[in-house]
Image (cartoon, rainbow, N blue to C red):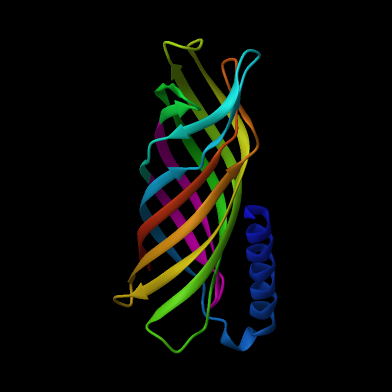
Amino acid sequence: MLLKITNIITALFLIAIACTLAKTALAQSSRIYMAGYLGLSKLSDANMSSSSINGLARYDNNMSFAGALGLRLNYNLRIEAEASYASNNFARLDNIELGGDISRMSVMLNGYYDFDVPWDIRPFLSAGIGMHRFKGDIRSSSIANDTGDDAALGWSMGGGLKYRISDDMAITGSYRYLGSTDIKIGAYDIEYNNHEFRIGIEYDLH
């Protein structure tokens, strides 16, 4: 189901880019802006395995933080270079209680399409690609404890709403899915699927 949703968002994003390139009359001067984001990081239940165990890991929700430098290419299309951080505590592995946590630091290049609508609040779609750096600490009285770190390719898909409160500033509310290739923390192979719900603020630099 998630793969189908991701494919639909990708197709919509590519169509939006094509429409933007065709509407050169609406292009505006490029503008650089800064953005900050505060979010809720919600990890999906995901497979966790080693040579001795194989189960479904569950996590507690936590906050995420991000900062970005953006460039508006025209009225609809913009890109952002983003650095972000999130950390989630382990809760359970099937019926086994887990301690410790898994943290992620990411560097992403994100593309945004702002829809041209006659409203004060404008919807947008987003997609990104980059690298994740993970650190993990797995503790339990029932399975082997372990720590480790790993790097992995990451990607994102999402969308949201933007409201411009002045010529220089806008606020946003958005959702994005953050995916990753499988990671290894010590002896454990872990799948990573993160759903982020974020509020943000953009400030244009002149």
Q: Choose between 38 and 5: the one closer to the eye.
A: 5
Most common secondary structure along the magenta stretch: strand
Q: Position of residue 89 (x, y in %)?
A: 39, 30
Q: Residue furthest left?
A: 165
Magenta range is: 65-89
Relative to 111, 36 lies left or right: left
Residue at left offset 67%, top offset 54%: 3
Q: Is residue 114 above or below residue 137?
A: below
Q: Position of residue 125 (x, y in %)?
A: 54, 67
Instruction: Give the quadrant of residue 181.
Output: top right
The quarter of the rendered structure image containing the N terminus is bottom right
Instruction: Give the quadrant of residue 79.
Output: bottom right
The quarter of the rendered structure image containing the C terminus is bottom left
Residue 189 seen by the camera:
no
Residue at left offset 64%, top offset 33%: 182
Instruction: Give the quadrant of residue 151.
Output: top right
Q: Position of residue 124 (x, y in %)?
A: 51, 71
Residue at left offset 42%, top offset 28%: 90
Residue at left offset 62%, top offset 54%: 2
Q: Residue furthest front?
A: 95
Q: Is residue 97 above or below residue 6?
A: above
Q: Position of residue 198 (x, y in %)?
A: 39, 56
Relative to 163, 9 lies left or right: right
Relative to 2, 59 lies left or right: left
Residue 146 seen by the camera:
yes
Q: Give the tally of numbered discs.
A: 0
